[in-house]
Image: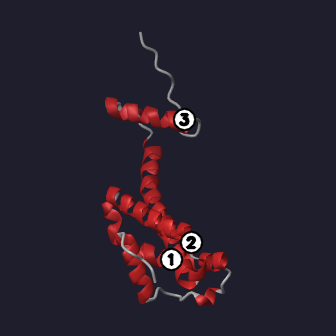
Amino acid sequence: MQRTAAPTGYNDDFSRWAEEQAAALRDGRFPDLDLPNLLEELDDLSQSERRELLSRWTTLTVHLLKLRYQPERASGSWRGTIIEQATRKRRVLQGSPSLRPEMPGFAAEAYIDARPQAAAETELPIAKFPESPTSEFERALQAALAGDDFEF
């Protein structure tokens, strides 16, 4: 006779809880499912993708701003970060294409977040960075996202 352990609580051991929930789903043991916590985790997965996109977009924007407003200090590392963040952003969108329509909102939020960070990292006054992206900045951003030359 096979003994089954008592179900692990969500707050006791998350990894084991997740494994037990997956097994219950696979086996069709729907009464054993912890629906409130499963729903919370599914909602969080969606939010996690959004947070990742915003983070990547913000980092990309910071480095483009630094490149634009402090070109004398530009480094291969800055350019590498721009390429890496654009690549990772594309990969997230490949896995979650339903988030594409939200990209203009992410871009606007990322720019707002990036200005003070770019100012801090360059030690330039925040007023040096326009309150909204210039057309020159937008062209460089689109080029970076397309994997093209993004120099200013």
**Mark 3 or 1 closer to N-term?**
3
On screen, residue 5 above or below 137: above
Percent position (x, y) of residue 15? 52, 37
Q: Name the residue under label 3.
A: 9
On screen, residue 116 above or below 45: below
Q: How far apart are marks 2 and 3 (CA)?
A: 49 Å
Q: Which of marks 2 and 3 is in front?
A: 2
Amino acid type at image mark 1 = Leu
Percent position (x, y) of residue 140? 42, 80
Q: Would residue 49 be visible to someone looking at this image?
A: yes
Percent position (x, y) of residue 23? 39, 31
State which quadrant residue 91 falls in: bottom left
**Mark 2 or 3 closer to N-term?**
3
**Mark 2 or 1 closer to N-term?**
1
* Horizontal relation, residue 61 to residue 105: left or right: right
Q: Residues within 10 Å of mark 3 (few under 14, many from 20)?
A: few
Q: Residues within 10 Å of mark 1 (few under 14, many from 20)?
A: many
The kind of secondary structure element at disc 2 is loop
Amino acid type at image mark 2 = Ser
The numbered dot on residue 75 is 2
The kind of secondary structure element at disc 3 is loop
Q: Nearer the viewer, mark 3 or mark 1?
A: 1
The kind of secondary structure element at disc 1 is helix
Using the image as rendered, state which of residue 106 and residue 114 is in the foreground.
114
Q: Name the residue under label 1.
A: 64
Q: How crowded is mark 2: few (under 14 residues within 10 Å), some or many (20 or more)?
A: few
Q: Would residue 104 be visible to someone looking at this image?
A: no
